[in-house]
Image: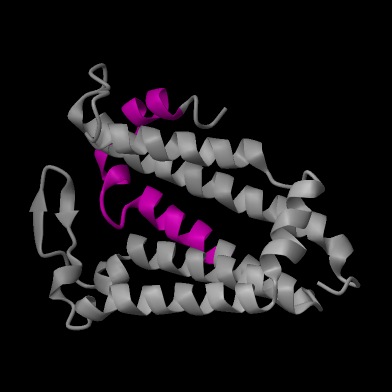
Amino acid sequence: MGVASALPVSAWLPSHWGWENGPLESTQVVILLAGCLAAVWAALRQSGRAARSVWWMAAVIWLILAGRELAWGAAFLPPVAFDDHGPVISSRVLWYRPAVPWVCLSLVLVSLTNMWRSKAFSRVVLVLQREHAWPWFRLTVLVVCAVLSAVAEGHGKIHLPFLDHTALIVSEELFETWGYLALWLAQWQVIRHMDGWARRLY
């Protein structure tokens, strides 16, 4: 429902809602950090190493996504310029920016190694598949939102000519917000399913 209403709502919302550090992007950061905290909470609730490793991996992904939305910290600095999209925020001004991809890659590799050593792929990932616990509908909504956000940003061969420039900026952020919310709900669905695993040796 929210995704379907994104286009008409984006035409109604003021332009600053789609700006960097605007209401929608700030909401996205809150959702992403909440997702990270929920993943950490889920990891601490599991007694098995394999299940914990999956949730630590999820926490890393949420953290990287939040870092990206915050421009790796540049969002807390004054904007470098203003254009028709509002304030311009660039991570290029950060002295540690070249190290960001390597830190992210290291976190992902450590998490994947932990999952491999704990046999999380066979003990958790495949078990979730056999128990039909994967939230495919919410993950599909996430993919649809990602595609629509890219289209609103002007990527790809599809365009939304019936929206003006301001509405396109807002709709891009609105689709991202709904996508992150769908991901959060997908994670929560798996957390609820895995509550019954607390006493299993995963």
Note whether 33 is above or below 126 in the view shown: below
Name the residue located 60 percent from the left edge and 79 percent from the top edge: 114
- Which quarter of the rendered picture does the C terminus lie within? bottom right
- Majority secondary structure of the magenta segment? helix
Residue 185 is situated, as x and y percent measured from the top left of the image, at: 64, 49
Residue most toward the top?
A: 162
Residue 73 is situated, as x and y percent measured from the top left of the image, at: 29, 73
- Would you say 82 lies left or right of 183 here? left
Image: magenta residue range? 6-34
Rendering quarter of residue 145: top left
Name the residue located 38 percent from the left edge and 73 percent from the top edge: 105
The total of numbered circles placed on residues is: 0
Name the residue located 41 percent from the left edge and 44 percent from the top edge: 176
Magenta run includes residue 30 = yes
- Would you say 133 lies left or right of 99 here? right
- Which quarter of the rendered picture does the N terminus lie within? top right
